[in-house]
Amino acid sequence: MDRFHALNVFVKVAELKGFAAAARHLNMSPPTVTRMVSMLEDSLGIRLFVRTTRSVMLTDSGQRFIEDARRILADLEEAERAAFGSYAEPTGELSVTASVLFGRMFITPLLGEFLDLYPKLSARTLYVDRVVNLIDEGLDVGIRIGNLADSSLMAVRCGAVNQILFASPSYLESHGKPETPDDLSCHAIINSTALNASAQWHFQSGRKSITKRVNPRISMNTNDAVIELALQGHGIGRLLSYQVAPYIADGRLKTVMKSYEPPEVPIHLVHQEGRTVSAKVRAFVDFAVERLKSDSLIGQNQTQA
Amino acid sequence: MDRFHALNVFVKVAELKGFAAAARHLNMSPPTVTRMVSMLEDSLGIRLFVRTTRSVMLTDSGQRFIEDARRILADLEEAERAAFGSYAEPTGELSVTASVLFGRMFITPLLGEFLDLYPKLSARTLYVDRVVNLIDEGLDVGIRIGNLADSSLMAVRCGAVNQILFASPSYLESHGKPETPDDLSCHAIINSTALNASAQWHFQSGRKSITKRVNPRISMNTNDAVIELALQGHGIGRLLSYQVAPYIADGRLKTVMKSYEPPEVPIHLVHQEGRTVSAKVRAFVDFAVERLKSDSLIGQNQTQA
DNA sequence: CAGCATTATTCCACTTTTTGGAATAATATA
DNA sequence: TATATTATTCCAAAAAGTGGAATAATGCTG
């Protein structure tokens, strides 16, 4: 017996003062209505109605119970509406994670704009240079750079980015400019362990893939530190293009071995929720994807920029 | 699917952060738990949990819904307890009906005492000299005098009473004292139409039953009026012994044809409720039966009084 | 008062739903 | 990497639910 349904039937019988009338109203057969009310009475251990074939009246217990039943049915309906509503409309707190630089450069600006659009929303960010488990840390959306490993997440591609080598002009004047991967053996390598701890650097020349094992002079666990060391002329670093874009632009860093750059890697927005995505996540993903796709540094047309 | 049961399962999964743990706790199988939550999600149109085989976390919608679900389940439990409680414990309003004189002489005194015993109770009485339908008029307990006609009512016998003939001393001095039913033809008859409109008066002499059709000089629809006319010497009346007991006792009325009195008729307390009798009805019936049985005018030992 | 239409209930055969064991894929942990 | 545990799906069996037919009861009407 569905108690919820039985409560509905009970209330209707009381309102229409008859089992047959309630059955007609609810499109059920009279025996079913009779049985449901009877089962409800049995489960409660009380008589809800005093009945003859011609009249049906609530007992005192029944009178008491119908008031509660009506309220509970209304509360349940309201609760369901509210739960569905919180899925249907962007409300609550949106939590987003990205690497520090990406967060600073791309997420923070667009998040401000997004929150202006949805005043009922608040936001929480986690910018760290490590892999974050969305579920464990209770986060809604993450930015993933590179080929996706976690297939249980929903992913939307929003751009692509290259890995580039760079050094300061002064370093290059002192040590010369490497032309091939093998030339790197004669240079000081600044390795980032932030997202990819591997010392295997990948290159591509024409159609040929080349992997070179580098011997880092120094390994740093944040990308900011890698950049800072390169600016000071300590060696050659490798990061994503957007991460050093400002320094390339103002000449403080120069790219190296541009003809050996590997294929760009994709950027995705990922979220854990499946087919029933909450409104806030859906709204943010839609908004962010559109913005990032049109960004000159990482957007889909980035290779032509 | 029992919606409330599913709510309970949902709450337990969330609290124990796992489907298997909830299944163990609720003595159910894991597939059943999985299915229940899934069916609940389908019916709501939202995702309640984000889950992997190793972790189960509430979505925002789920977080919102669990608060409501907890409250609704608690309300339902309280409503069931309250309904059962109002059956188990004498509370609410007790409604009693009796004929005017019976009510005044017997019910009112004992009702006062009964209410002193159960302070949570209130009472409502309907004293009328007509047959009352308990169900239609929403009454709990009735007093029935005579052989029972309505077999759907529960009845408890609490006494018996005679029909007696009476007249004032002055009437009897002026008109003589009738000795047989035939003698009544020469007398003024005061008929009561309150409960039995028949003009057929029944007598019993030894083992012989006699029915006499009387020609009323006057018919009154309340028993009080019959008594008043008799007191004023207008004729011979017929009522129940308790109804005229005070006047017989102080000599203002005298009985007539005592040897032709018909057998006493029973008095019952009746109520409509069946096997699950509310506490107030049960308490009152028990109390009233005991009191009425020991009353000297109508109790079980009345014939020896 | 008798006849009648309507009602609540019970019975029974059939249909639908629910259940848990077995199997499988996924996932934290050691 | 192996393993124990978990959530889920499948499937056959058990349980529950359903409505038509039958029956007794009961207000209403003539």
Image (cartoon, coloured by chain):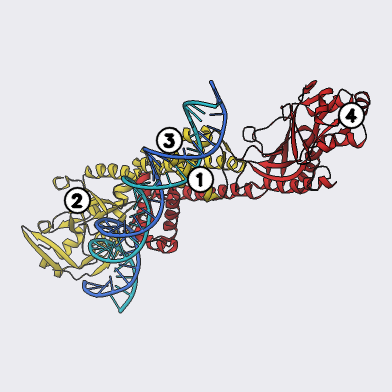
Chain colours: A red, B yellow, C blue, D cyan
User: Foreground mark, 3 or 1?
Assistant: 1
Residue B80 percent location from the top left of the image? 42, 43
Task: Name the image quarter holding the C terminus of chain B.
Answer: top left
Residue type beneath disc 1:
Ser
Q: Secondary structure at mark 1?
A: helix
Residue most toward the left? B207
Q: Could you give the CA–CA distance between mark 4 and mark 1, rounded to whole angstroms?
A: 61 Å
Q: Could you give the CA–CA distance between mark 3 and mark 1, rounded to whole angstroms?
A: 17 Å
Name the foreground residue: B210 vs A205.
Answer: A205
Q: Secondary structure at mark 4?
A: loop
Residue type beneath disc 2:
Ala
- Numbered tag placed on residue B160 in the rendering: 2
* Residue bearing the label numbered 1: B38
Q: Secondary structure at mark 3?
A: helix
Q: Could you give the CA–CA distance between mark 3 and mark 2, rounded to whole angstroms?
A: 58 Å
- The chain identifier of the residue carrying mark 1 reads B
Q: Are marks 2 and 1 on the same chain?
A: yes
* Residue bearing the label numbered 4: A177
- The chain identifier of the residue carrying mark 3 reads B
